[in-house]
Image (tube, grey):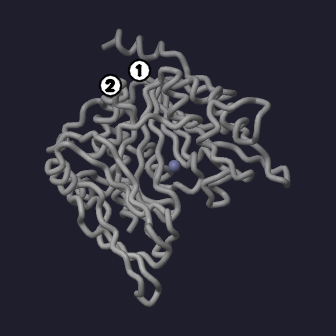
Amino acid sequence: MARAEAAASAREPFRIRDLVVPAGSRGATELPAAQLYTHTELNIPLQVVHGRLDGPTLLLTAAIHGDELNGVEIIRRVLRHGALSRLRGTLLAAPVVNVFGFIHRSRYLPDRRDLNRCFPGSQKGSLGARIADLFSREVLAHCTHLVDLHTGAIHRSNLPQIRADVDDAAVADMARAFGVPVILGSGALDGSLRHVAGVRGIPAIVYEAGEALRFEERSIRAGVRGCLRVLRHLGMLPKSRREQPPRWEPFVARSSQWVRAEQDGVFRPHVALGAHVRKGDLLGVIGSPEGEDQIDILAPAAGVLVGRNNIPLVNEGEALFHIARFDALGKVARGLEDFQAGVLDDLPVSEPPVL
Ligand SMILES: [Zn+2]
């Protein structure tokens, strides 16, 4: 015991910019991203939890698309979780990466660029490139693993899902450990934080859940639980005695496709997010406001609805439903039912839920 304590006290402090966080403590700093026109500083907040004992460094990021808010709340709850007092390694959390977008309730930067297409960035490039470069050098460079938290775009909901390059064993293990039923095994888009992490050999997954500009309790709880599971999977937290393993394995989709509007008009969806559909099932209709010239929208393939448009006014070509296809569709559907029913019950929370 005495030796273990001596070893623990010998762990080096965590240093990031001008912040020094001794082992077994927390700290906070800010990255100087930019200034407003008024010369008010606009900084990216960064939280550090530096465990007493050595271990991996996990980075949690949210609001890289500035209007995607579930992840901001997920990080708040993870940071308040009592289990972190027993953390091994270091947890870095950047709950608002795109501060410009966040204060403007926008996905984008003021020059309409998407920060998540600007990585790794450059010191002499656009605003997005400079912020991406700062974040890559000052934060990403410190971490060994990454979980990037997203939601659907404005007026679009995503079923809680993980996006990950499942051909990489370490990434696939993290994706499964997160413990939501649906995994889309996609390569990362060029310029995204996940992509640059992958290039640097940092196992990275994206969690997508809910809709922009909304808090959604199920998505948030599944996200908190997922982050804690990843921490346990990486050996950064002890195994939980209370938490039951899910009764299903996460399922990796074989492929996914968007169902698009074949005409302009008023859209009436007839299936909910997470629904299990068969090829040819009626998903919704589009017609004039009076209901003339109505066309049916049929499922082009069997699968699970993992994304949905929520605004009833649509133009031809607009994405309406995102269908993920699976080999064991029946099992996925049962796993999803279990997940949807259980996610509100199986995580003890100290605060009232967001309803
Ligand atoms: Zn996003």
Is 254 left or right of 327, judged from the image as shown? right
Tell me where residue 123 appears, x and y as whole percent: 76, 30
Is 171 left or right of 22, judged from the image as shown? left
- How many other residues sit within 10 Å of disc 1, few (<14), some (14-19) or many (≥20)? some
Q: Nearer the viewer, residue 10 or 230?
A: 230
Q: Is residue 163 visible?
A: yes
Tell me where residue 96 appears, x and y as whole percent: 58, 47
- Which mark is on residue 174? none
> Is the residue 115 above or below the residue 107 in the image?
above
Using the rendered view, name the quadrant where residue 30 is placed: top right
Distance Cα–Cα, label 2 vs label 1: 7 Å
Q: Is mark 2 within 8 Å of ligand 1?
A: no
Q: Are marks 2 and 1 in contact (CB under 8 Å)?
A: yes
Tell me where residue 113 appears, x and y as whole percent: 68, 48
Query: Could you tell me which residue is drawn at 33 percent across and 54 percent down?
Result: 323
Query: Could you tell me which residue is drawn at 35 percent across and 9 percent down?
Result: 3
Q: How many marks?
A: 2
Location of the C terminus by quadrant is bottom left
For disc 1, the marked residue is: 55
Q: Amino acid at mark 1?
A: Gly
Q: Nearer the viewer, residue 171 or 147?
A: 171
For disc 2, the marked residue is: 235
**Residue closest to the far right:** 38
Is 58 left or right of 181, judged from the image as shown? right
Tell me where residue 335 appears, x and y as whole percent: 18, 50
